[in-house]
Each structure stands twice: as structure tokens, then as C-alpha cells.
């Protein structure tokens, strides 16, 4: 992206974020459509925790938050004939490998993860003109990820991977202060005999105009479908505000 365009985008982003009432109806779709959705989740996961949940080939997970996906709420697999085609995102591949790696299958063909995300979520997101091609969907998700810049927000707030524990409310307050919205934070619950939960996923909610919004359910909205990640027997769920929270720096042999 060229600097001028980036600058424009950043200004746009912050003015949109600050100006929640300046909504446009440009992208509104009919509520009668079978695949209607109301908000998007930009889902980040913590690769160390993802690896801890699974016995897959997780060699040296990155120690930064990576993209899990860009998910419309309430709908999945909206067009089974719109196949993933990696050639369409060839210009994005180096950023994709860095920012959106297949954490669980680090040695396999990475495109499988992107194919899955496109078919399950991208084909639904594509009802918005700004997301209506594979290049736009993956490109916009990367752009949002870089602008939200969760990794540097957490660092600035002094929240780093550590062997000691955090209070969930401290993490939540830091994020809310920084972004002006409260994301949804998911954890692995404590294991048998342990007292701490482990942070695993941070989901930012976006309107159809791609503005940050609170993840809380607003009046007139039905409850979103659970966006939980299940791997084997371990499952992420919304973090408890009262349990100590572990933000691990490396995969530990905890079995
Ligand atoms: C599904 O995707 C195919 C391929 O892009 C497209 O031709 C078709 O119009 C789409 N169908 C719907 C219902 O959007
Ligand atoms: C994949 O995308 C490329 C570039 O748009 C196109 O040339 C090619 O025909 C597509 N392949 C399939 C199988 O649709
Ligand atoms: C990876 O997957 C893509 C598309 O699914 C395929 O075109 C490519 O040949 C695969 N590469 C390897 C090394 O298997
Ligand atoms: C999000 O919720 C907080 C606290 O309820 C509120 O102060 C803030 O204005 C909300 N932000 C947006 C963009 O709705």
C-alpha cells in the first residue's frame, strides 16, 4: 500500500472509530436474504495457546497474535460453488504467511486453512461490495489486522507473555481504553487442579461499514451464534473476569 493511501485509510479509520454515529447505508443488504448477517468478527488467536490445545504439528508457533479469520455472525458457507483459488491472492501471500499462518499445520500446505476460511466465512462476507472477491476479502482482513495492530497495543499497555498471571479485567480495560470498544476475549478454562485460565483468542467486532463496535449484543439483535473454537476435547470459551489469566510465552509440555 502506498503511503498516501495508507494515510488516508488511517484517517478514515480513526474518524470512523471516533464518529460512531456517522454511519452510511451504502452496504445495507436486505434482511430477507437467507444469509443475512449483522456484524463481522476480526478474530485474532494466540498461536502458543492454539498449539497447547492440540497435538498437531505445531513447531515453533509465532509469538505474536495472528489472524484466525474475518467472520460474519450468524451464517456460514454461503456459496458452495465459489471455490478458493490461491492465484487470486498471489499478491498477498507474503503477508498472509506472516499474519494469517496455519498455526496448527505449520509443515503442511498452508493454503488449506485459507480455503477453509474462505469457504466457511468469506463466501458470506462477500455480500458486502468491499469484500466481494477473494482478493478483497483477504486483503481487507489483512488491512484491518494491521490497523488494529493488537500486538503493539498490548505491548504499549505492558501486557506481555509471562509466567505470572494477569487479571482479565486489566487486559479488558487496557483494550477498551485503547480502542474505545470492548472486544470478546476467549480463554482455555483451567485444567484439572489448576487455577488459571489461558488467553487464546481476541475478537474485535465490526459493523458492515467496517467500523469497530462493541461486541456486546445491542437492542434488537438476536444473540450471535457461538464463535467458539473447539480442538479435540479442549475448547475456548468467553474468559472469566475473576480467574487469574495466563498469557503463555511458549508451548509447555503440560500433559
Ligand atoms: C456463487 O459463486 C459463483 C462463483 O463466483 C457465482 O457465479 C454465483 O453467482 C454465486 N451465487 C450466489 C447465490 O451468490
Ligand atoms: C484462479 O484465478 C486465476 C487468476 O484470477 C485465474 O486465471 C484462474 O483461471 C483461476 N482458476 C480457476 C480454477 O478458477
Ligand atoms: C497447495 O495447495 C494449492 C491449492 O490448494 C495447490 O495448488 C498446490 O499445488 C499445493 N502445494 C503443495 C506443495 O502441495
Ligand atoms: C462501547 O461501550 C462503551 C461502554 O459501554 C461505551 O462507552 C462506548 O461508547 C461504546 N462504543 C461504541 C463505538 O459504541
Image (tube, rainbow, N blue to C red):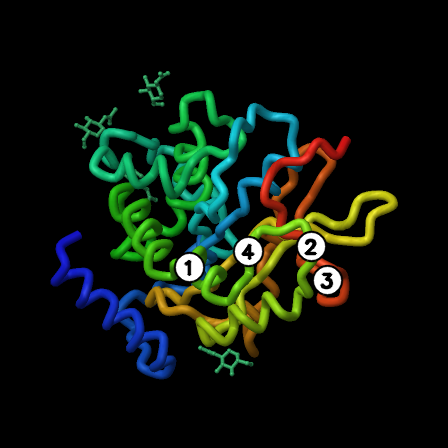
Q: CA distance from mark 4 to mark 1?
A: 10 Å
* Residue to which mark 4 is pinned: 160
Using a 10 Å C-alpha cutoff, classify the residue at mark 2 as few (fewer than 14 neighbours), some (14 to 19) or many (20 or more): few
- List the single residue furthest toward the right: 193
Residue 211, horizontal then vertical, whole percent = 36, 69
Q: Which quarter of the figure is the C terminus placed in?
A: top right
Is residue 154 placed above or below 87 in the rendered structure? below
* Residue to which mark 1 is pinned: 152
Would the CB of label 3 be found within 8 Å of ligand 4?
Answer: no
Q: Quadrant of residue 143?
A: bottom left
Residue 233, horizontal then vertical, whole percent = 74, 35
Query: Residue 164, which numbered label?
Result: 2
Seen at 80% across and 44% down, the residue is 191
Mark found first going from the N terminus, 1 or 3: 1
Would the CB of label 1 be found within 8 Å of ligand 4?
Answer: no
Q: Nearer the viewer, residue 131 or 199?
A: 199
Is disc 4 placed on a helix, strand or loop?
loop
Is residue 45 placed above or below 184 in the rendered structure? above
Seen at 62% across and 69% down, the residue is 170
Is disc 2 placed on a helix, strand or loop?
loop
Is disc 3 placed on a helix, strand or loop?
loop
Mark found first going from the N terminus, 1 or 2: 1
Q: CA distance from mark 3 to mark 4?
A: 19 Å
User: Mark 1 or mark 2, which is nearer to you?
Assistant: 2
Is disc 1 placed on a helix, strand or loop?
helix
Marks 1,2: beta carbons within 8 A:
no
* Residue to which mark 3 is pinned: 240
Amino acid at each position: 500500500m502506498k503511503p498516501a493511501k495508507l494515510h488516508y485509510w488511517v484517517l478514515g479509520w480513526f474518524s470512523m472509530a471516533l464518529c460512531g454515529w456517522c454511519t452510511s447505508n451504502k452496504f445495507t443488504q436486505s434482511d430477507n436474504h437467507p444469509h443475512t448477517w449483522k456484524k463481522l468478527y476480526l478474530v485474532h488467536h494466540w498461536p502458543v495457546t492454539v498449539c497447547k490445545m492440540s497435538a498437531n504439528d505445531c513447531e515453533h508457533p509465532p509469538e505474536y497474535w495472528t489472524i484466525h479469520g474475518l467472520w460474519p455472525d450468524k451464517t456460514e458457507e454461503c456459496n458452495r460453488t465459489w471455490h478458493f483459488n490461491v492465484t487470486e491472492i498471489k499478491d498477498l501471500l507474503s503477508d498472509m504467511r506472516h499474519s494469517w499462518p496455519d498455526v496448527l499445520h505449520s509443515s503442511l500446505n498452508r493454503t488449506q486453512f485459507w480455503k477453509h476460511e474462505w469457504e466457511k466465512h468469506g463466501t458470506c462476507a462477500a455480500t458486502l461490495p468491499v469484500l466481494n472477491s477473494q482478493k478483497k476479502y483477504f486483503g481487507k482482513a489483512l488491512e484491518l489486522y494491521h490497523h488494529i495492530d493488537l500486538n503493539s497495543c498490548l505491548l504499549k499497555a505492558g501486557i506481555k507473555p509471562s509466567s505470572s498471571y494477569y487479571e482479565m479485567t486489566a487486559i479488558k480495560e487496557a483494550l477498551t481504553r485503547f480502542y474505545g470498544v470492548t472486544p470478546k476475549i476467549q480463554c482455555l478454562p483451567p485444567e484439572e487442579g489448576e487455577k488459571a485460565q489461558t488467553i487464546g483468542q481476541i475478537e474485535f467486532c465490526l459493523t458492515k461499514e467496517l467500523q469497530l463496535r462493541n461486541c456486546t449484543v445491542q437492542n434488537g439483535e438476536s444473540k450471535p451464534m457461538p464463535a467458539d473454537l473447539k480442538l479435540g476435547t479442549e475448547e475456548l470459551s468467553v474468559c472469566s473476569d475473576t480467574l487469574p489469566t495466563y498469557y503463555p510465552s511458549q508451548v509447555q509440555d503440560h500433559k
